[in-house]
Image: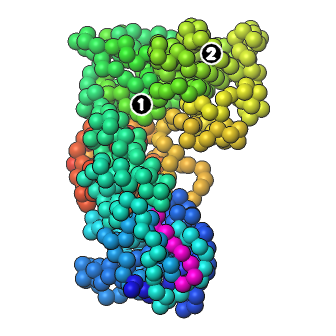
Amino acid sequence: MPKLLSVNVGLPREIEWQGKLVRTAILKRSVPHRVLARRLNLDGDGQADLQGHGGEQRAVMVYQIQSYRYWERELGRNDFEFGQFGENFTVDGLPDDEVCIGDRYRIGSAVFEVTQPRVTCYRLGIRMNNPQMAALLVSHRRPGFYCRVIEEGEVGAEDQILKIADGSGRISVAEIDSLLYLPDHDPGRIAIATQISALSPGWKYSLQALLNADKKGIQSGNAGLTPSISRPSAWNGFRRLRVASVHQETNEVMSIELEAVDGAPLPDALPGQYLVLRLVRDKGSQPIVRSYSLSGPSGSGVYRISVKRGIGPGSRYLVDATRVGDTFEVAAPRGDFVLQAGARPVVLLSAGIGVTPLLSMLYALASARAERHREVWWIHAARNAREHAFAKEARKLLDEIPGNHSAVAYSKPEPADRLGIDFDICGHLDLASIKELGLPVEADFYLCGPTEFLADMHRDLVSLGVPPDSVHLEVFGPANSIGPDAAKGTTKSPHPPVGSQGNGPLVSFTRSGLAVPWDNRFRSLLELAEACDVTVKWSCRTGVCHMCECGILDGRLRYAPEPLDQPAEGNALICCSTPESQVNLDL
């Protein structure tokens, strides 16, 4: 009969890792006494990253002594102690390829139900002094698993483990782990897995995303780990497009319409996507790579971008120097901030130049007969009429949408601006003004504007009852996403790495407006991004979780280690790659 060999607990604490302090509870220690297993945790145990660990579905982590012996042989080590793999229960028996999701076990006076495999992150690499452990546990099909507590009670070393129920579906921990993380995503087995009631909601969501991608014919990448995967780009790298027209929208904003050099219609974009331009001001200067949202109709055969003249060299060059007939190097439309089809109400909420991607969505809503029944709200914030770009254009489009709602806020209206005609709200958009509008909380919300505006609006909408996953944000510049243990605080502006510059291929972080030569002192593009304060998502750092997956506009990469499942076409995993040539990353 299987047996509980050790109960291991540990509270979060700070440890040093790569010159930084990391808060983690991976350092579990065996305890000699009996422990109370509660709904959310064992007494004396805790987790630092509650997004990836802990909670009702992940109350207790289980790992097998047989896997200890396997890794001792595989890694040539004999220094393991109970809790070495961050588990709460070290057990004799219960192998990952036999235990199934939904199986129930009585240990001591408590009852546990298997809910999901372990989600491995970089912290296990810290504990094992082997950064590849996250990938090794998955590829060797020995992840371990989590349980939820069905009946609270006491447990202790030497307790017998009694199986009291089989899970439905009979899909083992090892198999379901492979279905998500390894390349063979068998839709038949995945469909069975999604119906297992005991499977944690997070895993159901990821597996369902794989099924949805399969139905759409998306075979590239891993949609379960990168849900935003869309169709491949219309072309690879950069191609030359010609300026067909320019139009001054305001004193600071200019629209530029781009067409194919041969006059052929350009491929359709999705409403809300953006273009990346590579600008060369003169022969002796480094190229400037910048991204600009499409502001016109997405199926017109041409692309329109609208640029606000700021302090950056890219926007100043475009606004000051662009003439009809000029050509620019342009990457294909990309981005997952796109209007979703459906019948739910749509709220388009913008500030300043953030209006551009939402204007392309408004074009789509005005032209789509099938969606004319959708309730559409157009909410925009500007300083005054003189700086209010696309005011007439937006009104014309709204007139084509029956039963539309519109509200414009001017923070500093001028004497000639007419309340009730040019604008509806005097002052900034805030919780009070948003609440007074009576927005439908069941709507899909699309927000674009300055970072502070987005943070305030997101907070206010959620406080009014809007589900967080119904609020879609587009941020100009690098995404405001960071690693699991980074301290909350002010995000630094991207900058070259401290110290001497490298002499390798040029690495461009396009959304950050930064280009730096590669330096071999970094082990991955992720480490370079961190040294430059280019904020990115990451967790495993070994090509397993795909959290760091981002677009690569052009260039070649070398992977070490190879990802367990390849990123989508046109994407890259920067946690385990280095550049072989000049690269442009969509970060």
Can residue 162 be seen here? Answer: yes
Which residue lies under the disc numbered 1?
291
**Res 434 → quadrant:** top right
Q: CA distance from mark 2 to mark 1?
A: 30 Å
Look at the picture and state if 475 lies above or below 371. Answer: below
Nearest to viewer (mark 2 / mark 1):
2
Say if residue 502 shows up in the picture: no
Name which residue lies at 43% across and 56% down: 196
Is 270 or 285 nearer to us in this picture?
270
Q: Which residues are magenta?
A: 108-115
Q: Main secondary structure of the magenta part?
A: strand
Near-viewer residue (206 or 583): 206
- The structure residue drawn at horizontal position 41% and vertical position 40%, both measured from the top left corner, is 228
Disc on res. 404:
2
Residue 209, quarter of the rendered image? top left
Query: How many numbered marks, from 0 up?
Result: 2
| Residue 225 pos. (x, y %) | 38, 50
Please report contact status of discs 2 and 1: CB closer than 8 Å, yes or no: no
